Image (spheres, rainbow, N blue to C red):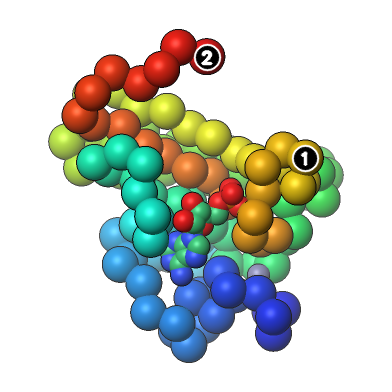
Amino acid sequence: MNGDCIFCKIVNGDIPSKKIYEDDEVIVFNDIHPIAPVHFLIVPKQHIESLASCDYSHEELLGKMLVLAPNLAMKHGLKGFRTMINTGSEGGQEVFHLHVHVFGGGTVLPKT
Ligand code: AMP
Ligand code: ZN
């Protein structure tokens, strides 16, 4: 737990969120500023700053987070979706607690 971290506060229940999944290692909630009709964030409960802070000890956790993406996307009516992990400020990361964006629905997403 990092006292200054907004996602740690969500994990702790100190800040409300629209939670769609939770287990002992991971919490998933809707992004507060969605960029698509469905947009949620898969967040480890452990405070990990970014993907760049991960090593092989995180393999299982990262695997679980990725496997959750299609599972929850389908449950929310998506046939396809996009995942995004912004890493570091140069990678567009604004909240420095690891998270996987999952979003889709509505119009076709732009080509990458
Ligand atoms: P990133 O740029 O990858 O760090 O994305 C951070 C994301 O967290 C943004 O899409 C924000 O809209 C989202 N966000 C920030 N605060 C909250 C919050 N309290 N509840 C849900 N999503 C949030
Ligand atoms: Zn945190």
- Give the image quarter of residue 32: bottom left
Q: Are marks 2 and 1 in contact (CB under 8 Å)?
A: no
Which three-letter amino acid code belongs to the residue tagged 2? Answer: Thr
Secondary structure under tag 1 reads: helix
Above-or-below relation of 24 to 67: below
Secondary structure under tag 2 reads: loop
Q: Which residue is mark 1?
A: 90
Which residue is drawn at the image coordinates 54% and 35% (left, top)? Answer: 84
The quarter of the image that holds ligand 2 is bottom right
Q: Left or right: where does residue 46 sit relative to residue 33? A: right
Q: Which residue is mark 2?
A: 112
Which residue is drawn at the image coordinates 67% and 42% (left, top)? Answer: 92
**Where's residue 24, x and y in %?**
49, 68
- Residue 59 in view, yes or no: no
| Quadrant for the N terminus in the image | bottom right
Above-or-below relation of 16 to 59: below
